Amino acid sequence: MTAERYYVENMWYAAAWEWEVAEADNKLARTICDVPLLFYKTENGDYVGLDNRCCHRSAPLSLGRIEGNCIRCMYHGLLFNPAGQVVEIPGQSQISSGMKVRSYPLSAKGGMIWIWMGDPEQANEEDIYDFPPLSQPDQWRGFERGDYLHYDANWLLIVDNLADFSHVAFVHASTLGGSEAYAYNTNIENLNKLDNGFSVERWHRDSLPPPYHRKVIPESEQGVKLDRCNSMAMYLPGIFLMETLYQPVGEAAAQGQRREYRNCQFMTPETRNTTHFFWDYLHGFDQQNPAIRVSLKESLMQGFMEDKVIIEAQQKLLELSPEFEPKAFTADRAFSHFRSRWKAKLEAENEANPVALKDNPRRIL
Amino acid sequence: MTAERYYVENMWYAAAWEWEVAEADNKLARTICDVPLLFYKTENGDYVGLDNRCCHRSAPLSLGRIEGNCIRCMYHGLLFNPAGQVVEIPGQSQISSGMKVRSYPLSAKGGMIWIWMGDPEQANEEDIYDFPPLSQPDQWRGFERGDYLHYDANWLLIVDNLADFSHVAFVHASTLGGSEAYAYNTNIENLNKLDNGFSVERWHRDSLPPPYHRKVIPESEQGVKLDRCNSMAMYLPGIFLMETLYQPVGEAAAQGQRREYRNCQFMTPETRNTTHFFWDYLHGFDQQNPAIRVSLKESLMQGFMEDKVIIEAQQKLLELSPEFEPKAFTADRAFSHFRSRWKAKLEAENEANPVALKDNPRRIL
Amino acid sequence: MTAERYYVENMWYAAAWEWEVAEADNKLARTICDVPLLFYKTENGDYVGLDNRCCHRSAPLSLGRIEGNCIRCMYHGLLFNPAGQVVEIPGQSQISSGMKVRSYPLSAKGGMIWIWMGDPEQANEEDIYDFPPLSQPDQWRGFERGDYLHYDANWLLIVDNLADFSHVAFVHASTLGGSEAYAYNTNIENLNKLDNGFSVERWHRDSLPPPYHRKVIPESEQGVKLDRCNSMAMYLPGIFLMETLYQPVGEAAAQGQRREYRNCQFMTPETRNTTHFFWDYLHGFDQQNPAIRVSLKESLMQGFMEDKVIIEAQQKLLELSPEFEPKAFTADRAFSHFRSRWKAKLEAENEANPVALKDNPRRIL
């Protein structure tokens, strides 16, 4: 008898900002893809990812104590090494090799810790969709530290939101969009369907700067009409990377007034109904002016809260009526492709490596 | 493969007081019979009832914007007309006829908006159990506006409560009942079993006025023994209409001291475990004295809260033990008949129009 | 078609401290083994245990009124005697013998009310694991009254906790344990596997008094090294009785400095996920000094809160992953035996008296 996976496992997921682990006293408990995990930082400075449950009695290791490179469960004192193996049981000299928990490959890049949820043999750090601007503070200036939001919604609803920017017109008219014209006058250009996602460009021409942008440019530029381009890529499972350009209409060469942004949003399923959302918004001009990043964070947060209301309402309705069949239209091509790629990889994994349903003869309860 | 309906659909349900829609900025989100609905008032003043989920991505239309007779989803901007048809998709010229949500027949009477949950072809406004006193303010004076309560209980438990007034003796001894003698000395008279409910009379003779009545009659009448008659009708799905008469013992002709009330209570299932409860209590004497309606509302609310504690406790116990088999006795005849009429109509609908269980090849999640 | 029991029924469970019933106005509603129950005290002073749901409409009898030895449902006025039989229905002269609720054998000992959840014919008060120190206030001084805690965890997780005292080293190092050495240097001695549980001794030799003990002994004894013995018994379903001895190392005869405690902890399942926990901690020295029991209660509560954090965390993880298979080691022998005895008794009951799954043709809802 086999069960169907809900999540693709052989994939890197954004797990936590490094500062989150530090703030949690170097031991962060976090559920990813329905799996309760512990991320801890060893005294050597390495990150370790383990199942957050002692193999003995199911106590959370996150209540434990870091000892060198190991973590000790503070219930009966079992000591686990970074591979998840028990290396000490107080009051007992023999340790069976079966006394262990699962250890997951981790990798830290640009302040973000990534986790590989599948077969460790197949984990390759080269496959992480690292976002270079996060590591180029002179060129791209982001927030003091990357930000985190928690959504009461399936991560695909957030991917869906980002895959069609026409919503910017209605949801964000007074914040990120600027006017409802954005929905009528922009077009998806160069939709590239990729094996692991898609990329797309969206030009909105000849319009005044939208509110969030206007707040960070000089008075003299506020009335200048601009062409705006959002060039974005979305990769599985939910890695959103975007380049945004504003340039005066017809004056593409006027470099002095070109303004660029870089934006990353990493969506990681916590459960089927909740999502970890990591993000940063970086600007490529006037990098030394702290007022800009403060203003951008405030504007973007306002926009995200506008999204969150709708997305969490969608989630509630979908939980009430799981049989709902969405009616698609043209603008859904990008997300439909993304969804089908996810499904294909999931089916391939289910086929290659069926999940056995187990009986359990030795339950605690 | 078919599923069983839980609710009769070809039936009028009390949906909302008109003032509730007005207070919700003319867009009221309300679930009825497990269906999330939107009630909005067009700029023409008509009421429209639609499924409260955009057919595109399941965003709630109640977060939308009324435009003339239409409502616009404020996620991607789809515009719906009162028939539920999409009449505009920003950025797209063609609209498939399948782009629509379900629209429900509505009808406003006596301040209450009624909804037909079934086949629109069969909806007939004549079938609404409108309560004339609600539209006769000179003769019957009710509250400033009809009132609303929310119950954490299946609506049939409230119907059950109202179907046997012997509970008045124990639950409401010091409010609506007056004494426990009410349970021992009154009898159901003239129980009429109807196709769509029942009607019944209950006389309680030769007793002092109960507390709620005593509070609104002159000092001189307080010691006068009365015969009391509650004459009520209960119609499917949960329409309770009652005439109450107090008259001095043996002096039925003494019109000056006869006092009458009219009472309506409309129970509408929100979900299987929760109920919308609409009510008014009208008096047919001294109509210009505002102190009377204030006193009656306070007394009745006190009584309803006494009911609510018990009914919501019943609900919790029934949820814990859905296999509970009630042991009936004589006084349950009225409710038993009501229950069997509901069941008969439900079975007829299930037979005439089986509900197909669908596979869903195009899920968002 | 049959269902499996989750709880052994032919067994005495700790139900409530007598003072709890008194404080609840002599009518205590409490769920035990998933069964909503009412415990009331008759005007004669007897305790009665009934299903806490009227057989008529499922209203809770705990909202009722004690009348002599009976309790009246305050919905429609049915009067139940201590056997659970309806003896009065207002407004109706005939009463069918089927009008009744289940009545459970109760027995009060040492301030605790015990309930027999199974066949009344098999109930024998002699089988109650009464704890004599609770009834010997001159010799063993406990709290002003036995204490109650509520756990959001299956009761077996608490039994599990108490079955292996090595956790004292890690969970309670600074409260009840004293040092982590307790886990390494103590050994289970004399594990007796019983048909209905186990008993075990655990000596921890040659160590300073642990914090909770140090707080209640004279200054002069604080530096004296002691041998410590916990001698405990655990009986089904979750009756924990412990004798604790502290004696100066190698001076077993020095009676003046021996200190003894008695401790009882009764774990009773409320539901599969929650537990009633009753306890007292009694000291056998300086019985007239009220500061001692105050100090002990504070220390023990601190220790229990340390346990509660871990045990409720275990519960959450087990609910998330019911397929978890614990990896046992030597110290689990006691609990493993206990678990297997519970299972054996449960299977025997399921076999001897299968639970029928019923259809229900007469539902209220």
Image: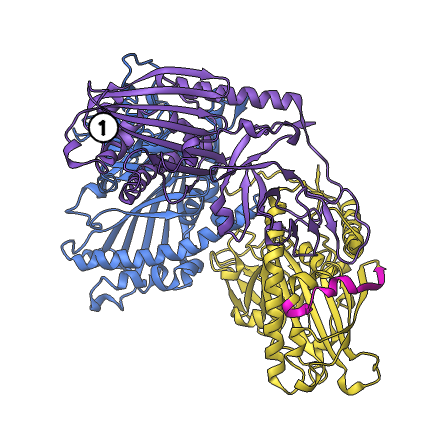
Chain colours: A blue, B yellow, C purple
Q: Which one is in front, C334 or A64?
A: C334
Residue B231: x percent and y percent?
79, 69
Q: Is residue B185 magenta?
A: yes
Residue at disc 1, secondary structure: helix
Q: Is residue C204 visible?
A: yes
- In the image, residue C231 sits, relative to residue C290, either above or below, namely above
- All told, the count of numbered labels is 1
Q: What span is colored magenta in the figure?
A: B174-193
Residue B13: x percent and y percent?
69, 61
- Which residue is labeled 1 in the image? C256
Check the picture and name the quadrant holding the N terminus of chain C. top right
Q: Is residue A146 left or right of residue C107?
A: left
Q: The disc labelled 1 sits on which kind of residue?
A: Gly
Q: Which one is in front, A158 or C186?
A: C186
Q: Is residue B48 magenta?
A: no
- In the image, residue A86 sits, relative to residue A304, either above or below, namely above
Indicate the chain on which mark 1 is placed. C
Query: Outermost residue, top direction?
Result: A94
Residue C290: x percent and y percent?
29, 44
Residue positioned 81% across, 78% down in the render: B249
- In the image, residue C313 sits, relative to residue A152, either above or below, namely above
